[in-house]
Amino acid sequence: MSVRVSRRAVLAGVAPLLALAAASAPDRTGAGFQGAADRTGAGLQNAPDRGDAARQSARTAAAGPPGTDVAAEPWPGETRTVRGARSLVLGHRAAPALLRDLARRADAAGARVSAVLRTPVRPLVLVPDSSAEAARLARVAGVEGLAALADGGRVIVVPETFGRLTDVGRDVVLAHELTHVAAGTGGLPPWLYEGFADYVAYRDAGLAVPVAAAELAAEVRAGRTPRRLPGAADFAPGSSRLAAVYQEAWLACRFVAEWRGEQTLVRLYRDARTRGAARALAAAGLPTARLTAGWRAYVREKLA
């Protein structure tokens, strides 16, 4: 597996989750992560230095044993640090209660990702004081509407948007982004890396499939079952179907896990990173045509 950090912006949205901010709809987190930009690395533990000294020192602090006082200073003199059981949260003028809550959630999200990947995951979460600062840290033009970004070996929280999510939405976002960080995305089609991240994020969220895939369910009930796995162009920002596209990807990975077992899905993902998705699918006895046919039937079964 390559350890090179991808410089590509990877779309993984949160817009459907924002609909859940209202306390009147606590059971709905939406489907997938429409609109959030991820810039992912190949692994939390071994992501290489990108020339940013503060970022590298933050990784070093995250790798330190629990209970140590070593902490990075991405905001010299203004960095607040909270350690969880397995996580490290660094905030810029952030409220201590928020950092403690994020450490607890990051611990849980890390455990969720670790349970699927069967490898230790030690989350590093940065909490800037504004969306503008989040964009500067991630070196992107803007983060409007985003709740979090996976960037190299860390997750950057966008405080204004993250704060409007429900509890379930926050947990799902963190698990999704940590999956990108820990599993990597290089060499994979978007349907596989986004679907896999959603598979992990929703695995223990307690949401019924028609609830988590509400937009796609509406299409299926109207007689519009998807005909093919979503391609890269389908994940373009601004698409009116972006939420449904993420749901399609999620259900493709969920289908593989239910049909062949979760560890088959994990092996497929890892194999696809080194050999390419088409070869990995064929080696797993799931050539694209067979996978597509089974996935389409699964979508109808779950959502019709």
Image (cartoon, rainbow, N blue to C red):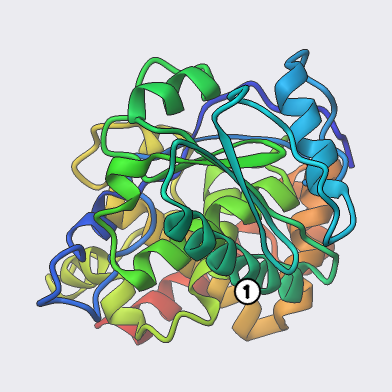
Q: Position of residue 242 (x, y in %)?
A: 29, 46
Say how many tags the image has. Answer: 1
Nearest the viewer among 75 and 34 is 75
Q: Is residue 22 above or below residue 188?
A: below
The N terminus, quarter of image: top right
Q: Image point 14% across, 74% down: which residue?
A: 23
Nearest the viewer among 304 and 16 is 16
Q: Position of residue 174 (x, y in %)?
A: 52, 58
Q: Counting other residues with Cα less than 10 Å from the Cα at mark 1, is it few (<14), some (14-19), or many (20 or more)?
A: many
Nearest the viewer among 133 and 174 is 133
Q: Image point 57% across, 69% down: which residue?
A: 104
Q: Is residue 130 above or below residue 89?
A: above
Q: Is residue 299 left or right of residue 156?
A: left
Q: Is residue 182 visible?
A: yes
Q: Amino acid at mark 1?
A: Val
- What residue is pinned by disc 1? 256
The C terminus, quarter of image: bottom left
Q: Is residue 242 left or right of residue 66?
A: left
Q: Is residue 43 visible?
A: no
Nearest the viewer among 144 and 273 is 144
Mark 1: secondary structure = helix
Q: Is residue 236 above or below residue 12?
A: above
Q: Position of residue 275 (x, y in %)?
A: 85, 43
Q: Image point 23% across, 72% down: which residue?
A: 217
Q: Position of residue 225 (x, y in %)?
A: 28, 66
Q: Is residue 196 left or right of residue 114?
A: left
Q: Image point 39% across, 15% down: which residue?
A: 141
